[in-house]
């Protein structure tokens, strides 16, 4: 009897939580509790992440060289020390490469006018339903909800939830993510005429490959050759600032992999190869603060200023 | 003391599930160790401990990984804890082979239940993606990890090794012979 009461209580509690969570607005009490939990779990996850980093680096390295190791079993004992050193230095080289590219972010044209806050990923959630990571920077570092997140390769995602010293980044691979984009045939955003570029909406496409993207609503008369670069369009609007893009223009998203025009449709469907390797995100930069920029019609708006 | 050990096991499992395992991603997929930890607790400590730890682990996962809505994993893991804890209390045999069967069953049931709840909430990936990217990889990892995790949880809970893979309390106590 006691067990059944406990079971009933826990089931009712779960369903009540779920129901209340969906009924309340984004700023509601349960959402605030969830954000508040980040204050506790963020530092805990950061500490755990630091503790398990050697194991993770070793695991990553082991997976990469699995085939090569198959033939070396006889020498494994003799090489154990050398391999440990190699694993450590490979991890350090990888991290050094990532950090070097991070340093380059602040020099990119799209980052001009923004404060670039460097952050490290301390927790990951990359299942089928939610693609997000937790970073070790938060409100105290100037981060705000919806701030764009980039790394040396391009757009990573946006700040979805922010606590004082940690924040959750919704990745571009999350099923609910979408970003307005344009195709740059020449590969150089600065050298093209914006009006003639093909524009559309980049969203992840469900499939066995979690890093699969598509670009929708692209006018079929516009060029979209395979290999062309795809960047954020950074829409501005004089009449309705709420409709403006959250992201500055020209952040790399990926390249055109292939394109097709479904029967009786006026738009192309484009498969996109992402610029960012979402499987190995370690360090990112959050573009925060925004900058005044001139819209196509000559008006000035403060990009990144709205939540 | 038992409650403290259970809390530590759940906390460590949640932290590793959100930091180490998604970072390792063997073969490109993240193992789901949390279901197996709840299963081990249920088999070793019975339905009450299983469902309470399942609820706590699910809620902690949803709070620490910020996986959208609260309550889904809490509900799913509560049920996993109850079902397998109840079976253990009623004398269900636990051999290495059966442990693998339990691990596979718990993982498939948990992930299918999670997908169904998401479906009700209007998050509807194709069935092929659910199977290929979620259920099947998690099941394959469960086959490999269920016995090591069971033994590790048993060690962390400080249970004596008499009684094979089962908790000694169930061997001697039968139905209702819960926590020693």
Image (spheres, rainbow, N blue to C red):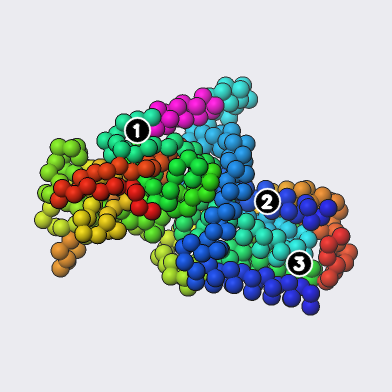
Q: Which x, y percent locates residue A57?
A: 54, 34
Residue A74 rendering spot, x and y as whole percentages: 59, 26
Q: Is residue A89 magenta?
A: yes
Residue mark closest to the camera, 2 vs 1:
1
Left/right of residue A303 with respect to residue A264 in the rendered view: right
Q: Give the camera-side residue of A205 and B167.
A: A205
Q: Is residue A59 left or right of residue B147?
A: left
Crowd tier of the residue under label 1, counting other residues whose Cα lies within 10 Å: few below 14, some 14–19, many 20 or above: many
Left or right of A268 on screen, residue B89: right
What is the secondary structure assignment of the residue under circle 3? helix
Q: Residue at x 29, y 53 (%)?
A: A245
Q: Is residue B50 above or below residue A67?
A: below
Look at mark 2 in the image and give the residue it sits on: B11
Could you tell me which chain the residue with mark 2 belongs to? B
* Residue A52 in view, yes or no: no
Whether the residues at callouts 3 and 2 have beta carbons within 8 Å, the answer is no
The residue that label 3 is drawn on is B48
Whether labels 2 and 1 share one chain: no
Nearer mark to the viewer, of 3 and 1: 1
User: Residue A35: x and y, percent?
Assistant: 54, 54
In the structure shown, which secondary structural element does the residue marked by tag 1 occupy?
Answer: loop
Residue range (magenta): A87-102
In contact (CB < 8 Å): disc 2 and disc 1:
no
Residue of label 1: A106
Q: Chain of mark 1?
A: A
A118 drawn magenta: no
Foreground label between 3 and 2? 2
The quadrant of the image that shows the C terminus of chain B is bottom right
């Amino acid at each position: 009897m006691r067990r059944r009461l406990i079971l009933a209580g826990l089931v009712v509690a779960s369903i009540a939580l779920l129901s209340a969570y969906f009924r309340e607005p984004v700023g509601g009490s349960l959402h605030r509790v969830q954000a508040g939990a980040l204050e506790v779990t963020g530092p805990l996850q950061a500490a755990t992440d630091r503790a398990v980093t050697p194991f993770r680096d070793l695991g990553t390295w082991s997976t990469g060289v699995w085939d090569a190791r198959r033939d070396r079993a006889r020498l494994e004992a003799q090489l154990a020390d050398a391999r440990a050193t190699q694993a450590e230095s490979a991890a350090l080289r990888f991290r050094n490469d990532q950090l070097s590219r991070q340093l380059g972010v602040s020099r990119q044209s799209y980052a001009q006018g923004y404060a670039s806050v460097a952050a490290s990923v301390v927790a990951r959630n990359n299942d089928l339903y939610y693609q997000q990571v937790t970073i070790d920077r938060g409100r105290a570092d100037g981060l705000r909800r919806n701030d764009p997140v980039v790394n040396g390769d391009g757009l990573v995602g946006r700040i979805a939830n922010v606590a004082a010293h940690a924040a959750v980044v919704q990745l571009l691979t999350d099923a609910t993510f979408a970003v307005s984009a344009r195709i740059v045939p020449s590969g150089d955003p600065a050298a093209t005429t914006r009006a003639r570029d093909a524009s559309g909406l980049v969203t992840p496409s469900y499939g066995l490959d979690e890093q699969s993207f598509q670009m929708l609503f692209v006018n079929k008369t516009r060029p979209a050759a395979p290999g062309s670069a795809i960047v954020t369009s950074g829409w501005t609007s004089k009449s309705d600032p709420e409709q403006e893009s959250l992201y500055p223009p020209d952040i790399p998203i990926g390249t055109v992999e292939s394109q097709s025009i479904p029967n009786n449709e006026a738009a192309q469907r484009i498969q996109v190869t992402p610029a960012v390797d979402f499987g190995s995100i370690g360090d990112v930069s959050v573009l925060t603060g925004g900058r005044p920029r001139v819209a196509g019609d000559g008006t000035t708006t403060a990009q990144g200023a709205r939540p | 003391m038992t409650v403290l050990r259970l809390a530590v096991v759940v906390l460590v499992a949640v932290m590793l599930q959100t930091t180490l395992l998604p970072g390792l991603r063997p073969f490109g997929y993240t193992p789901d160790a949390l279901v197996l930890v709840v299963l081990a607790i249920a088999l070793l400590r019975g339905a009450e401990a299983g469902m309470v730890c399942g609820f706590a682990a699910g809620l902690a996962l949803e709070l620490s990984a910020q996986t959208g809505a609260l309550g889904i994993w809490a509900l799913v893991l509560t049920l996993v804890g109850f079902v397998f804890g109840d079976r253990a209390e009623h004398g269900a045999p636990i051999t290495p082979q059966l442990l693998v069967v339990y691990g596979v069953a718990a993982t498939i049931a948990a992930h299918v239940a999670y997908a169904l709840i998401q479906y009700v909430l209007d998050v509807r990936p194709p069935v092929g993606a659910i199977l290929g990217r979620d259920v099947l990889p998690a099941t394959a990892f469960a086959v490999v990890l269920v016995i090591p995790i069971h033994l590790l949880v048993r060690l962390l809970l400080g249970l004596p090794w008499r009684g094979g893979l089962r908790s000694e309390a169930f061997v001697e106590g039968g139905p209702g012979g819960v926590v020693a």
